[in-house]
Image: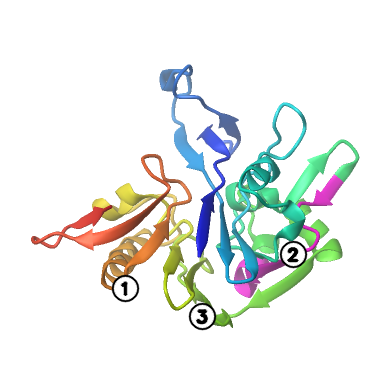
Amino acid sequence: MQVFTLYEGSYSVAADKKFVPFDPQIDNPKDRPASLFIYVQPFLVKFNDKLLLFDTGLGYSNAGGEMILHENIRKAGFNPGDVDYVLMSHLHFDHAGGMVHQENNGMELSFPNAAYVIQRGEWEAAFTNSSSSYRTEIFEFLQRNAQLIFVDDSGEFLPGISHELTGAHTPCHQAWLLDDGTDKVFFGGDVLPEPEELLRKFIAKYDYDGRKAMELREEFGKRAAAEHWNCLFYHGKTRATGFVSLTDDGQFKIV
């Protein structure tokens, strides 16, 4: 199994939910008060004969007008048209914006040959939730133009590709686990978005159920250590991937 990090950039997010590019080398965080600073990095995984994409980022373009996500997929040695499945954790804009490409002439599917795999409850909630984190115009376009596959609860989507309904970050957020018989790769979406959230216990205000999210991180951390998962951290600042181990005093360590 091969894993490729598709780093889209770092951003500041204020109460208006707008993602503004932020370069820590030149930008001063004091100039953006009351902002959350995040990294955004989807993942491409070569799983047997399938090419899988975990979440799609913001869908922003580079200076030449090409999607950063497409640019990074090509750098990894693949073509965006080769993606077989787009496996979504949830549909907040920073994870789902790149499902489409916004152009002057309107929208296009970013991955026209892929099936978009979404938890059914998350899809339904995206149309009814008033939060600006959901962009319904994207979902309406997908409904008309994309190959959509809806999954329910937890289960095995394809042999070796399992989804687990977690809730916590959104009511119908899901995580993904790959197992090719040799390696195991875990994508926790925004339930386990960065290694620091595993190393310290806290309840995040941005989660739908912060306490459950905290408890799930603990659970996933123990499973990751016991089963040698390669964990993918979508918002990881210090590292994008890592293996979890437990120290002698029961603390988590990322290696």
Q: Nearer the viewer, residue 248 or 170?
A: 248
Amino acid identity at mark 1:
Glu
- The image position of residue 1, as x and y in percent, is 50, 65
- As for residue 187 lying within the magenta part, the answer is no
- The image position of residue 47, as x and y in percent, is 57, 68
- The image position of residue 142, as x and y in percent, is 79, 60
Residue named by callout 2: 114
235 on left or right of 78: left
Q: Are marks 2 and 3 in contact (CB under 8 Å)?
A: no
Q: CA distance from mark 1 to mark 3?
A: 19 Å
Q: At x 65% / y 48%, what residue is drawn? A: 73
Q: CA distance from mark 2 to mark 3?
A: 22 Å
Q: Secondary structure at mark 1?
A: helix
Residue named by callout 3: 154
- As for residue 114 lying within the magenta part, the answer is yes
Residue named by callout 1: 227
Amino acid identity at mark 2:
Ala
Q: Residues within 10 Å of mark 1 (few under 14, many from 20)?
A: some
- Residue 101, located in which quarter of the rendered image? top right
Check the image and report above or below for 91 versus 151. Answer: above
Q: At x 28% / y 64%, what residue is drawn? A: 218
Q: Secondary structure at mark 2?
A: loop
Farthest residue, direction left: 249
- The image position of residue 197, as x and y in percent, is 32, 51
Q: Which residues lie in the magenta part?
A: 107-125
Q: At x 36% / y 66%, what residue is drawn? A: 229
Q: At x 57% / y 46%, what residue is drawn? A: 6
Question: Looking at the image, is mark 2 or mark 3 nearer the viewer?
Answer: 2
Question: Looking at the image, is mark 1 or mark 3 nearer the viewer?
Answer: 1
Mark positioned earlier in the residue sequence (2 or 1): 2
216 on left or right of 126: left
Q: CA distance from mark 2 to mark 1?
A: 30 Å
